[in-house]
Image: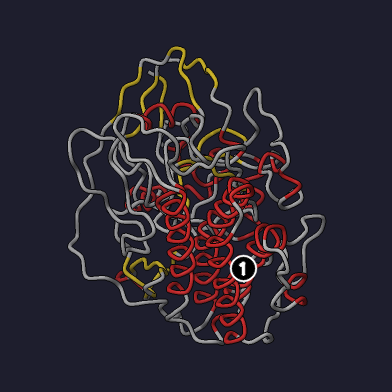
Amino acid sequence: MPDTHPILPAGPSSLPSGPPSDGGAVLSATERRQTLASRFQKARARSAELVATLSPEDLMVQTVPDGAPAKWHLAHTSWLFEVAALIPFSPGYRPADPAFLDLFAARSERATPPPRVLSRPSAAEIMRHRDQINAAVLHLIDGIDEGLWDTAEAALMMAIAHERRHQERMLLHIKHALWCNPLRPAYEQAPDHPHLGVPPDGWVEQPGGLVEIGRPVPLPGFDHEGPRHRVWLNPYRLAARPVTCGEFLTFIEAGGYSDRSLWMTDGWETARAEGWSAPLYWERGGFGPGTRWQIFTLYGMQPLNPDEPVCHVSWYEADAYARWSGKRLPLEAEWEVVAAGCDSMGNLLGTGHRHPRAGTCHGTGPWQMCGDVWEWTRDAFTTYPGYRRPDGCDKVVPDEAVNGRLASNRMVLRGGSCLTPFDHAGPWTRHYLRPETRLAVSGFRLAEDA
């Protein structure tokens, strides 16, 4: 996941204020401060909670070249609160540890950075540093001058959203680090929940036509999710649910990874070079006729559940499967139109399940449009028509606040995963990854022309 930050609307705060509309309550200045402080504390507490099961040794491991150890994520999110809020808006503030401002700054993308080997500072020092930042931010929220409130609140909201996004990235890097350990240790114990079974196979019919997509203003979000604009769609059908592990296993057993005709040229070359024969974290257990597939999860090695959505597949694998099945991946506009009318959420961070689940079946679908797995689309990532670089973003975090700068060599995913915070998953949520990426909890659903 790119190390980027969201842009909130300029001007007045995105928190409720002013005269009530539709009978809504008005928040006083004190209530607005309390609301922001509560959001801040919840986000910071969740990050600490996510590493509570890990040892200090776990926190310093980096196994992904462009990733980071868990304790770097913990310190980096504090760094943004310092540079975006405390230093600009808290008179007399002095960094808790000046060396941390450089050590935990956002990495440059000009070249592949060296691994972050972080035996020092210790995990305890980093957690103390977080406590110091927490106290300073709460003091700022309580005492900031009213004339600076709107600007400071926007900066703090951005930093809170940044921390929430890093929670997903951190869990992805933790999972990979544990998988690389020969002991295959579990991050936590699997929750006891009933097997739900796979939702029935089905299709959602759409007439197409002239549709509007993009994040509605003034809802807060990321710069690359707007502006809202019109797109023409031909009639199409969208699968009611994501492709399952059982369905993808059929593709494997049919020789999908050895049939060059199914693959884009770059995808075929990547799959050969990397030795792909199944999604990331899939392993065969045992030998002979009793061989069974297993999958590594944050709960350790688990038997492959054929009914749950397949995940940790690249865009190349999703595209090859779609071609094998005689279907295609959906356009992101096709996906959004269906998701905008869907009230069925999937499994997101906070539900207590750190792995995709087979969805519950209510009505005719679609199911799990937002949650369980990020869903690949057939679109290359680019900015929308009418996109403008956000004004003044370089005054907060130079360049890092602009997602549109990454509109190259990436494909669009939609929805959100079981590790995505609930407030970062919605019909207009746009994610983007390189087509060979398999680290994210990425799956897909099929589409076809009507």
Side of 426 where 260 appears, left or right? right
Can you say which quadrant of the picture contains the N terminus? bottom right
What is the three-letter code of the residue carrying label 1? Ser
Judging depth in this view, the residue of 330 and 292 nearest the camera is 330
- Image position, residue 343 (x, y; %): 28, 37
Side of 25 where 277 appears, left or right? right
Count of marks, rendered view: 1
- Image position, residue 218 (x, y; %): 51, 32
- Image position, residue 359 (x, y; %): 26, 49
Q: In this view, does 274 lie above or below 378?
A: below
| Residue 6 can be seen, yes or no | yes
Q: Is residue 127 above or below residue 374?
A: below
Q: Indicate the quadrant where residue 20 lies.
A: top left
Judging depth in this view, the residue of 424 and 391 nearest the camera is 391
Can you say which quadrant of the picture contains the C terminus? top left
Judging depth in this view, the residue of 312 and 102 nearest the camera is 102
Q: Residue at x 42, y 76 (%)?
A: 187
Q: Residue at x 61, y 74 (%)?
A: 69
- Image position, residue 22 (x, y; %): 31, 29
Q: Which residue is drawn at 54% across and 76% down?
A: 180
Judging depth in this view, the residue of 35 and 332 nearest the camera is 35
Q: Indicate the quadrant where residue 225 lies.
A: top right
Side of 397 where 136 appears, left or right? left
Q: Which residue is drawn at 43% across and 49% down?
A: 423
Q: In this view, does 134 lie above or below 380?
A: below
| Residue 271 can be seen, yes or no | no
Q: Is residue 55 above or below residue 194?
A: below
Q: Indicate the quadrant where residue 173 lies.
A: bottom right
Per the image, the residue denoted by label 1 is: 78
Label 1 neighbour load within 10 Å: few <14, some 14-19, many 20+ = many
Secondary element type, mark 1? helix
